Amino acid sequence: MIIAHSWCGDNNGYSAFNNEVKRYTDVRPSERQLAFNDMKYYNFIHFGVNTFTDREWGTGEEDEKVFNPSELDTDQWCRVLKNTGSKGIILTVKHHDGFCLFDTKYTSHSVMNSPLGKDIAALLKESCEKYGLKLGLYLSPWDRHEKTYGTPEYNDFFVNQLTELCTKYGDIFCFWFDGACGEGANGKKQIYDWDRYYETIRKYQPNAVIAISGPDVRWIGNEGGKVRKSEWSVIPWTQRVLEEVAENSQKNEADGQKMISFDRVDEDLGSREVLFNKADLRWSPAEADVSVNYGWFWHDEEYYRKNGYKKGSSRTGKELAEIYFNTVGGNASMLLNVPPDKRGLINEREIKILNEFSEIIKNTFKSPVEYEAAAITEDFSERSLFSKEFMLQDDEAGIKIMPSDSFKTVLLEEDIRFSQRVEKFEIYADGEYMDSYTVIGSGKIIRFDKAISAKELLIIITQSRGNPVIKSIKLYK
Ligand code: FUL
């Protein structure tokens, strides 16, 4: 068998080592980004006045009394989500309508003046602790209720609320700031004091990541769970990154349906051509936010029929599993929204879909296949690998694997503490070329159509930014 290239030979015409390449691999995740990265799959909970008024965007005029869940049970949310693979929950403590699900001193427009009269963030904190889930908070910058919106005082209001959220609910893993703002925004334009928001979070919750309209986690750019073919974590950072979040976000309530099917997956954010000579490169991991339903808040089937949603209310478990394989297996994380219904419970309809989804994921990764592994040089002499975490040496082309059984799925992970390095690789089974792939990053999931029963699997790295550092290679039946 002839392998035309090895990363260490000509690296496909791309330098493996020089100052420019080193600049890219010197960009590495922070501790908080590393911890976040390990989560991979976690959930959104959209809950609020919209749940009761059957809207996706509230007006800000809603009476607090409409918020009236009859059987609210945050333990049930955690049980359902934990059982279906979640690592954490991000709750909409305030959506664009300004109604707060937490006990705040700064507005009376909150759950404390609803018939429920209980702080839902506090209840969820308790439940998350009980079930071993991390807690995250979505606080909408755009606020249609708050009178100071559009003035500098609104920044004080927002920082005051953030401070409450930072100091009363234990460890928060993520603050999620979306980019939406309605056209016209009630005739008001708010200049957000982002720096002050970020400083507040860093001061009180230094381990929390700030997502989307923030420096730590990058929005994938659509709400359909689509990642780019090559999703890069090192990108040039400019003010544009945040401006684009705002520009590409939803502009009106009816847009929701479009957003869900919109793919913005072609742009190249971080190849060498893009990074070349750019200043301020940053570690910016991608996150895909997706909803179980074709909407963020809970609605019954009638709502979806009335509003012309041809596919009905929800994605199937199988569709969600595909999204999981493509996002978690495409160097991104998956944030799946599961909205509670009017009772304040995750509905049987969504539970069924989640169960179907998690069965597929569990089955895919249920039976690991043992193997022996060796690093190989271009002429295929071998160096045995004692540990499965290893860095390839300069004269090595890839990894040779001798599986003990047939397999259908391969999971590769780079050790991203050393940045993202692998640019291209190929797989051969018993000498036969299977396919070529781009990027690995935090995780690459490769699923073959049928079981491969090869004695020898070669993973040849054909292009890399310096020595590839592979954290793990796993095979599954
Ligand atoms: C968007 C919002 O407009 C949607 O309602 C939803 O919350 C989504 C996650 O973020 O910006």
Image (spheres, rainbow, N blue to C red):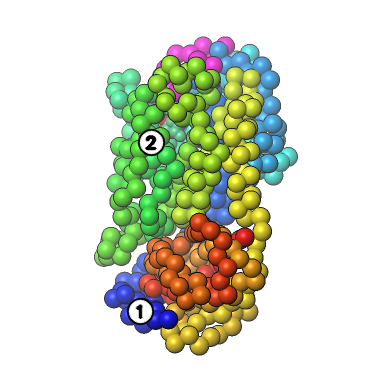
Q: Is residue 216 shown left or right of residue 248?
A: right
Pick the residue in front: 278 or 331.
331
Please tell me whether mark 2 or mark 1 is closer to you in this view: 1
Which numbered tag is attached to residue 4?
1
Q: Is residue 302 above or below residue 282?
A: above
Q: Residue at x 64, y 68 (%)?
A: 405
Q: Quadrant of the N terminus?
A: bottom left
Q: Tag 2's secondary structure?
A: helix
The local secondary structure at tag 1 comes to loop
Q: Which residues are magenta?
A: 52-65
Can residue 445 be spotted in the picture? no
Where residue 379 sits in the image (x, y, percent)? 44, 87
Most common secondary structure along the magenta stretch: loop
Give the residue displayed 50% in from the left and 71% down from the top.
Answer: 429
- Disc 2 residue type? Ser
Which quarter of the figure has residue 146? top left
The quarter of the picture showing ligand 1? top left
Kind of residue indicated by mark 1 = Ala
Q: Position of residue 272 (x, y in %)?
A: 30, 65
Q: In the image, is 270 to the left or to the right of 365?
A: left
* Front-most of residues 315 and 61: 315
Locate residue 59, reporting x and y percent: 42, 17
Residue under circle 2?
Answer: 261
Q: Is mark 2 within 8 Å of ligand 1?
A: no
Mark 2–mark 1 CB contact (< 8 Å):
no
Q: Residue at x 50, y 65 (%)?
A: 414
